[in-house]
Image: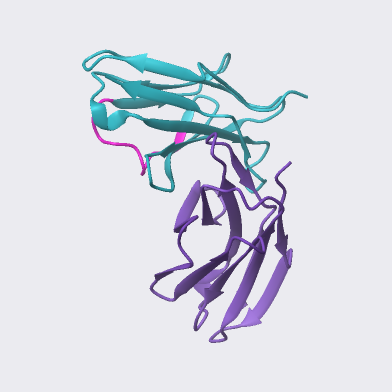
Chain colours: A purple, B cyan
Amino acid sequence: KQEVTQIPAALSVPEGENLVLNCSFTDSAIYNLQWFRQDPGKGLTSLLLIQSSQREQTSGRLNASLDKSSGRSTLYIAASQPGDSATYLCAVSLADDKIIFGKGTRLHILP
Amino acid sequence: NAGVMQNPRHLVRRRGQEARLRCSPMKGHSHVYWYRQLPEEGLKFMVYLQKENIIDESGMPKERFSAEFPKEGPSILRIQQVVRGDSAAYFCASSPLELETQYFGPGTRLLVL
């Protein structure tokens, strides 16, 4: 059974710092991995999608890596800003289209 | 407590027909979200509803798509005059409160011939 774990559950860092969010999954047979952002009162926003054959994806200040063999992904946020405060979710898609989410990391950027 | 239920799980339509996708949220959940996953793409937000209200429809295509969440019954995502590009997996999620974790259903896979 696929399980997705995110560490830490919550994180507070001063503005301007670089930070890393971690995601691990138990079964390497994934179709792709996505990182999402969840803001209060909003639906999930897809940040980055990494196909199983890829190692990383970048979008602006965000960089996500994928090591399928070890069951790990990281989301790197450079030069953090208060607007980055949100809950970040990692999710893996399986071959049968099921999507398994982690519980998320609540990020708070201190001005 | 049953999870989020979606039906049908698979739906085949011909171009020009209507597709109606249903989502029954978890018991006690009054917030529903719809997402679409196109082939080879990530999950994309479509619409966020509370009972009888559309809160955020910023991700909904302007034409042919509509969503409702009536006081009684499931949430419905309706696609009129479907085209081949509508073929995708449509996921519904629910949450008990605005800031709570969203729980996802198994999805409806729509195929337009």
Q: Is residue A90 visible?
A: yes
- Compared across the picture, whether A70 is left or right of B6 comes to right
At 37% from the left edge and 40% from the top edge, which residue is drawn?
B39
Which quadrant of the figure contains the C terminus of chain B?
top left
Residue A37 position within the rendered picture, expressed as x and y whole percent measured from the top left: 53, 58
Q: Percent x, y for residue A67?
A: 59, 66
Q: Taking A30 as reference, is B32 above or below it?
A: above
**In this picture, which residue range is highlighted in magenta?**
B54-64
In the image, B41 versus B1, the foreground residue is: B41
| Residue A94 percent location from the top left of the image | 57, 42
Does residue A62 appear to the left or right of A89 in the view shown?
left
Residue A53 vs residue A46, the one in the foreground: A53
Quadrant housing residue A19: bottom right
Q: Residue at x 26, y 13 (%)?
A: B17
Assess whether residue B55 is covered by the magenta stretch.
yes
Vertical comparison of B106 with A52: above or below: above
